[in-house]
């Protein structure tokens, strides 16, 4: 950051945050925007075993420690971030640098080898790679991304990581339900969002373009993407909706809208216990009561080791 006066978090953002959290959690969440977190990464089991990678990183002077409850996940102190980024293991795709909260989505979706899975908002590909590793490169894994530059970044990351099962599509996810109805066992919607979990007071550029209008704009796209995912999944299949935003409009609001729109064709389901600090999703907000089932979603709260995240699982009823 320059010597210029630090730019505080936007007041409207802080007000919305306060209104969405229990009073005894608010200050800690607010403080987390100024915290330096360790750097986390995942060993890519398509290319290497945990022990081999950990030994090599230690030989290079790093000190990885594992993350309880998240298979193949490790952290190094923030001061080692650069060395990790420049390590051979990252260059050759044995390691992928990824937030711990981000790793929770594939764990909850729980794809199995041989299944047909769609990753609807895929670039730069951290979750696609993790899905491919969990599926042992067996079955169908389609990855969609409409941004051209991000699409090629996705392709490069998948190639580096040896995710040979993945077919990539440069297209708008909102069109996918119409093009491939009833096709997939599981769909991940890691939606484009206002990115509130990525805000850091050490870099005010991270929130410079935040506004309530932006949040509402994101929510409109998110609703369309979630509907497309529910059209693309087979009857009986499941969709995991997630964002790295804390905003209720982009999280519970989107899920509630979708449940209301699709009625008895869709149901929300509980998300299993996660190895993270969590709260259940809100069942109402600013005087509005959400559709039944919205409370099954999970709000991952930011802390010293991971960022915020939101996850909700929906099942398309047969
Ligand atoms: N899943 C990714 C990962 O783990 O690396 C991160 C996804 S990021 C949160 C959201 C992505 O959705 C961005 O790459 C963005 O370009 C893409 N996106 C934006 N609009 C979209 C749309 N209409 N359909 C599909 N993807 C979209």
Image: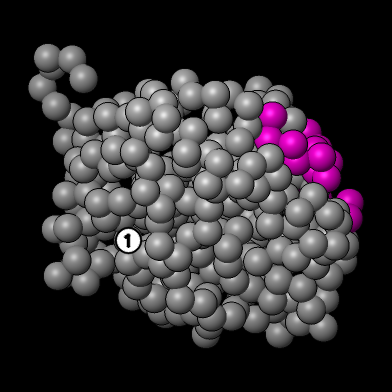
Q: From the viewer's perspective, is 240 left or right of 233?
A: left
Q: Position of residue 137 (x, y in %)?
A: 79, 50
The quarter holding residue 276 reads bottom left
Q: Is residue 100 above or below residue 124?
A: below
- The residue shown at (44%, 70%) is 274
Q: Colour scheme of this structure image?
A: one colour
The quarter holding residue 138 reads bottom right
Q: Position of residue 83 (x, y in %)?
A: 39, 24
Q: Is residue 120 visible?
A: no
The magenta segment is 160-180
Q: Is residue 98 above or below residue 73?
A: above
Q: Is residue 302 above or below residue 202?
A: below
Q: Out of 299 and 95, give the one closest to the viewer.
A: 95
- The residue shown at (35%, 69%) is 278
Q: From the viewer's perspective, is 179 left or right of 312?
A: right
- The residue shown at (40%, 35%) is 58
Image quarter (top left, top right, bottom left or bottom right) of the N terminus: top left
The secondary element bearing badge 1 is classed as loop
Residue at numbered disc 1: 301
Q: Is residue 169 magenta?
A: yes
Q: Position of residue 24 (x, y in %)?
A: 14, 70
Q: Out of 70 and 278, give the one closest to the viewer.
A: 70
Q: Is mark 1 within 8 Å of ligand 1?
A: no
């Amino acid at each position: 950051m320059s010597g210029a006066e630090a730019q505080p978090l936007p007041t409207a953002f802080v007000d919305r945050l306060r209104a969405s959290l229990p009073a005894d959690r608010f200050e800690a969440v607010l403080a987390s925007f100024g915290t330096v977190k360790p750097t986390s990464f995942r060993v890519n089991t398509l290319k290497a075993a945990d022990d081999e990678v950990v030994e090599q990183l230690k030989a290079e002077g790093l000190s990885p420690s594992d993350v309880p409850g998240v298979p193949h996940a490790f952290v190094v102190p923030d001061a080692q971030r650069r060395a990790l980024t420049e390590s051979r293991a990252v260059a050759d795709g044995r390691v992928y640098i990824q937030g711990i909260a981000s790793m929770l989505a594939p764990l909850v979706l729980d794809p199995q080898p041989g299944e047909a899975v769609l990753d609807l908002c895929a670039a730069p590909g951290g979750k696609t790679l993790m899905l491919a590793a969990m599926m042992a490169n067996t079955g169908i894994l389609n990855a969609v991304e409409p941004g051209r530059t991000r699409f090629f970044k996705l392709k490069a990351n998948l190639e580096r990581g040896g995710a040979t099962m993945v077919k990539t599509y440069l297209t708008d996810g909102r069109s996918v339900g119409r093009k491939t109805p009833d096709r997939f066992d599981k769909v991940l919607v890691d939606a484009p969002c206002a990115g509130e979990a990525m805000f850091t007071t050490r870099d005010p550029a991270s929130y410079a373009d935040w506004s309530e209008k932006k949040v509402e704009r994101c929510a409109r796209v998110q609703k369309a993407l979630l509907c497309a995912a529910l059209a693309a999944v087979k009857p009986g299949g499941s969709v995991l909706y997630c964002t790295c935003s804390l905003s209720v409009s982009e999280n519970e609001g989107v899920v509630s809208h979708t449940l209301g729109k699709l009625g008895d064709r869709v149901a929300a389901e509980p998300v299993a216990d996660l190895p993270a600090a969590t709260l259940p999703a809100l069942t109402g907000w600013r005087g509005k009561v959400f559709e039944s089932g919205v409370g099954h979603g999970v709000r991952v709260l930011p802390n010293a080791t991971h960022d915020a995240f939101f996850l909700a699982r929906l099942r398309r009823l047969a």
